[in-house]
Image (cartoon, rainbow, N blue to C red):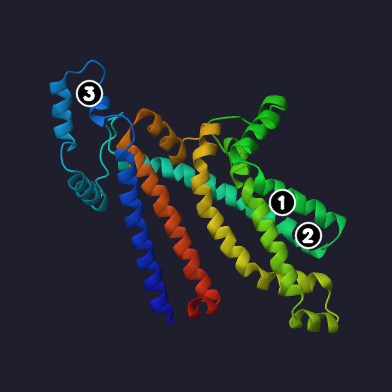
C-alpha cells in the first residue's frame, strides 16, 4: 500500500474515533444525576430563575440541537464556560494540559531509561537467576496499581525519609515522585518488550556472522543487535506515553498535581459539565494523536506494516 494512502487512512480513522468519542462524551453526561441549571442558579433559586438559566444555556433544546451547538463550538474554539469559575474552558484546559504533558514526559523518560536498561540486562542473562529476578520485578511493576505505587513513594520518601515533597508543583523536586509513580507500570512493559525483542534479534544470522568474525560482545549487542531490537520497543514507548495521560487522573489526584487529570476529577465532583467534556476530549484527542503518529512512524521504519 502506498505510504500516502496508508497515512490518509490512518488520519480518517483518527477523525472518526474523535467524532465517536465526542458523541459518547456528550451522551454519557446527559445521564449523569444533577441539573447543571440548578448548579449554576445555586441553592434556594426559584423555579423561574432555574428555567431562565436553562434557556440561557440551551438546556431546554432537544438533545441533538444541544450536541450540534456544542460540537460546532468545539470546532470553532468555543468550548463553553465553566459552571463553577465562570471562565472560558479552553484556556484553563491548555494551562492544565501543559502540566500533565510535563508529568507524562518525565514519567515516560523514567520508564524508557529504566525499562530498556533492565530489559537488556535480562536478555543478556536469559534463563539465569538474575533474569528471573528482573522478570518478577517487571511483573510486579505491571500489576501494581499506579495510585498504590504513588502512596508507597509518598510514605517512604516524604513521610519517613523527608527527602522529597509529597504534594504540589513548586519546582522540579515536586516532579520526581509523581513521575516515578506514573511511569512505574510502563517500566515493566518496556522491559519485557526489550528483553523479548533483543533475544529474537540475537538469534538472527547477522549476529552469528558478527560473532564468527570475532567482534566484541558489547559491539554486537549495543551497536548492531539493540538497534534492530529497538523498533517494537519504540512503538511500545509511544503507546505507553499516550496511556500515561489517562493514568494522570489518579496520580495527579494523589500528588495534588495541577494537571488536567486533577481538573477532571474536581470537575466531576462539582458537576462542572463543560469542563468535564473538555477535559475528556483533550485527553482523548492526545491519545488518538500519539497512536496515529506512532503508527505512521512505524510504517516508515517497517514497510510491512503498510502492506498488511
Alpha carbon distance from label 1 to label 3: 52 Å
Tag 2–tag 1 contact (CB < 8 Å): yes
Residue shown at the point (87%, 55%) measured from the top left: 129
Viewer-side residue, 28 vs 144 = 28
Alpha carbon distance from label 2 to label 1: 10 Å
Q: Considering only vertical position in the picture, is 55 above or below 248? A: above
Direction from residue 17 to residue 247 in the image, left or right: right
The residue to which callout 2 is attached is: 122
Viewer-side residue, 95 vs 42 = 42
Residue shown at the point (55%, 76%) measured from the top left: 302
The image shows residue 75 at horizontal and vertical percentages of: 25, 53
Alpha carbon distance from label 3 to label 2: 61 Å
- Mark 2 and mark 1 lie on one chain; the one further toward the N terminus is 2
The residue to which callout 1 is attached is: 138
Residue shown at the point (42%, 40%) measured from the top left: 96
Question: In the current view of this chain or complex, which residue is farthest to the top?
Answer: 44
Q: Considering only vertical position in the picture, is 205 above or below 132? A: below
Direction from residue 172 to residue 46 in the image, left or right: left
- Mark 1 and mark 3 lie on one chain; the one further toward the N terminus is 3
Please tell me whether mark 1 sits on a helix, a strand or a loop: helix
- Mark 3 and mark 2 lie on one chain; the one further toward the N terminus is 3
Please tell me whether mark 2 sits on a helix, a strand or a loop: helix
The residue to which callout 3 is attached is: 41
Q: Residues within 10 Å of mark 1 (few under 14, many from 20)?
A: many
Q: Image quadrant of residue 37?
A: top left
The image shows residue 298 at horizontal and vertical percentages of: 53, 70
Closer to the observer: label 3 or label 2? 3
Q: Considering only vertical position in the picture, is 247 above or below 4? A: above
Amino acid at each position: 500500500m502506498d505510504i500516502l494512502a496508508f497515512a490518509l487512512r490512518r488520519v480518517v480513522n483518527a477523525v472518526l474515533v474523535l467524532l465517536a468519542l465526542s458523541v459518547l462524551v456528550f451522551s454519557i453526561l446527559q445521564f449523569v444525576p444533577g441539573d447543571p441549571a440548578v448548579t449554576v442558579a445555586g441553592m434556594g433559586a426559584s423555579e423561574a430563575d432555574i428555567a431562565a438559566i436553562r434557556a440561557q444555556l440551551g438546556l431546554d433544546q432537544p438533545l441533538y440541537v444541544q450536541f450540534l451547538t456544542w460540537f460546532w463550538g468545539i470546532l470553532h474554539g468555543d468550548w463553553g464556560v465553566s459552571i463553577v469559575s465562570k471562565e472560558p474552558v479552553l484556556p484553563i484546559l491548555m494551562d492544565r494540559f501543559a502540566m500533565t504533558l510535563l508529568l507524562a514526559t518525565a514519567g515516560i523518560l523514567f520508564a524508557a531509561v529504566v525499562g530498556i536498561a533492565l530489559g537488556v540486562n535480562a536478555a543478556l542473562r536469559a534463563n539465569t537467576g538474575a533474569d528471573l529476578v528482573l522478570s518478577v520485578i517487571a511483573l510486579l511493576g505491571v500489576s501494581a496499581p499506579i495510585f498504590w505505587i504513588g502512596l508507597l513513594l509518598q510514605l517512604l520518601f516524604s513521610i519517613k525519609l523527608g527527602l522529597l515533597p509529597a504534594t504540589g508543583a513548586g519546582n522540579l523536586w515536586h516532579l520526581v515522585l509523581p513521575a516515578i509513580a506514573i511511569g512505574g507500570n510502563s517500566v515493566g512493559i518496556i522491559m519485557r518488550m526489550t528483553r523479548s525483542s533483543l533475544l529474537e534479534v540475537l538469534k538472527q544470522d547477522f549476529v552469528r556472522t558478527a560473532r564468527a568474525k570475532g567482534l566484541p560482545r558489547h559491539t554486537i549487542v549495543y551497536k548492531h543487535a539493540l538497534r534492530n531490537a529497538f523498533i517494537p520497543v519504540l512503538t511500545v514507548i509511544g503507546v505507553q506515553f499516550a496511556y500515561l495521560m489517562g493514568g494522570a487522573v489518579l496520580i495527579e489526584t494523589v500528588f495534588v498535581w495541577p494537571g488536567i487529570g486533577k481538573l477532571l476529577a474536581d470537575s466531576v465532583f462539582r458537576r462542572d459539565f463543560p469542563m468535564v467534556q473538555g477535559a475528556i476530549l483533550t485527553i482523548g484527542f492526545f491519545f488518538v494523536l500519539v497512536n496515529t503518529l506512532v503508527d505512521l512512524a512505524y510504517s516508515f521504519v517497517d514497510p510491512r506494516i503498510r502492506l498488511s
